[in-house]
Image (tube, rainbow, N blue to C red):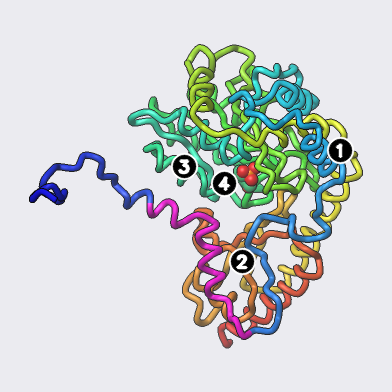
Amino acid sequence: MENGSKLSSNSKKWGFKKDTKQMTKASMTTIRGVITMLQENLDKDDVRSVVPLSHGDPSAFPCFRTTPVAQDAIAEAVRSAKFNGYSPTVGIPPARIAVAEYLSKDLPEKLSPDDIYLTVGCTQAIEIILTVLARPNANILLPRPGFPYYETRAAFSHLEVRHYDLCPETGWEVNLDEVEALADENTVAVVVINPGNPCGNVYTYNHLKKVAETARKLGILVIADEVYDHLVFGSNPFVPMGVFSSITPIVTLGSISKRWLVPGWRLGWLVTNDPNGILKEQGIVDCIKGFLNISSDPATFIQGALPQILGDTKEDFFLETINSLKMNADFIYSRLQEIPCIVCPSKPEGSMFVMVNLNLSLLDDIKDDMDFCVKLAQEESVMILPGIAVGLKNWLRITFAIEPSAIKEGLERVKAFCDRHAKKQ
Ligand SMILES: *Cc1c(COP(=O)(O)O)cnc(C)c1O
């Protein structure tokens, strides 16, 4: 080999160095990252089974199994051999029609199949819209607490994040004054998650309308994360943000992951609710199509099964899921009242989670929410997500989409843990 042919770091000035600090930090604070860390802290010698109150995948539990309608639809789609090829980048027409019909049931104006873009879960829908909206100096308004994938994704696209608070005193409503104060001429959108993860909130028609009106005043669009659509069991019905699309453009994100209990099937959608054609005029629609041209699509046979999944699933299946979630939510809420250091501001009315506040002044040797969750994993083999992972320090996110017996066992252990660590009077 010729002398000097080996590249050395000073032979050329590399031009592709990234600022990895921000991105590494962002991907460290994902829910998956924190759960992996808690798993590493579990006591392997504890003979009791682990109680997973931290994750959001109920499909592992027999009481949260998907409907046979969905299973049969997939099997038939595979056997038909009609869905073995590549799909169009926006999704196959029958699947787009099916999503348009499914969502239009709750909307005053019908969606067109052309408003529907099929995605690899709701996750890819988030990726698409944030990437499309990113431009130099742009910022986006995200809820705190929220779903940390938004922050991570924004960091990778150099989209500045500004957090508005959800208020526990008002059922985790959006602080609209704060939204107005945070926004400036570079703000592109506000994200609203309803039904809420991590708070279990379900917003009223009037509140959602106010969000849309605020967005209009600011000249921004609303990104409505409705991945928990219809998973409600309190006094408020589910109202899709798309109802207010004549006020301001709405981009709705969803998937079959949560309502059909199949997060591993990776089928979601991005929907433009835009009767005034503003997104089109602003070039957003072309950008969405452009991005889809360079990204991968949901598996074609899953798309092929979608018309049957969305169209033929019986109401009984949905009611059963909602009943299970409601019973679990009621149970967890009443049990939490018996644990003095944990304060639950409101009973969850939707999704699969509840946010609770940790009163550290009642505990002896617990530094913060992370310390609480690590020690709880070590001593009681119970996994709970520290609030810091969703943006709220010294809170906890508890999932109730697991087997009722496991919730009971888990909360007994949490109570024992809290009693043991309580400050002596
Ligand atoms: C689960 C979840 C997603 C991602 O949904 P997938 O369809 O599994 O990709 C997006 N947003 C929120 C708020 C979620 O809880």
Residue 384: mark in rendering: 2
- Whether pointer 4 and pointer 3 mark residues with C-beta atoms closer than 8 Å, the reply is no
Q: CA distance from mark 4 to mark 2?
A: 21 Å
**Ligand 1 falls in quadrant:** top right
> From this viewpoint, which residue is outermost toward the left?
3
Image coordinates of residue 202 in percent, x first then y, are: 71, 43
Q: Secondary structure at mark 1?
A: loop
Would you say the beta carbon of the disc 1 residue lies within 8 angstroms of ligand 1? Answer: no
- Whether pointer 1 and pointer 3 mark residues with C-beta atoms closer than 8 Å, the reply is no
Badge 1 or badge 3: first in the primary sequence:
3
Q: Secondary structure at mark 4?
A: strand
Disc 4 target residue: 166
Q: CA distance from mark 2 to mark 1?
A: 33 Å
Disc 1 target residue: 313
Query: Where are the magenta residues, as a range?
Result: 24-45
As shown in the figure, which amino acid type bears the numbered disc 2?
A: Ile
Answer few, some or many: residues within 10 Å of disc 3's Cα (few below 14, many 20 plus, some between 14 and 19).
Answer: many
As shown in the figure, which amino acid type bears the numbered disc 4?
A: Leu
The secondary structure making up most of the magenta span is helix
Q: CA distance from mark 1 to mark 3?
A: 33 Å
Answer few, some or many: residues within 10 Å of disc 2's Cα (few below 14, many 20 plus, some between 14 and 19).
Answer: many
As shown in the figure, which amino acid type bears the numbered disc 1?
A: Thr
Image coordinates of residue 392 in percent, x first then y, are: 51, 56
| Mark 1 or 3, closer to the camera | 1
Answer few, some or many: residues within 10 Å of disc 1's Cα (few below 14, many 20 plus, some between 14 and 19).
Answer: some
Image quarter where the C terminus lies is bottom right
At a point 76% along the width and 37% down the height, the residue shown is 238
Q: Is residue 207 in sight in this rendering? A: no
Badge 4 or badge 3: first in the primary sequence:
3
Image coordinates of residue 326 in percent, x first then y, are: 81, 54
At a point 80% along the width and 44% down the height, the residue shown is 235
Disc 3 target residue: 153
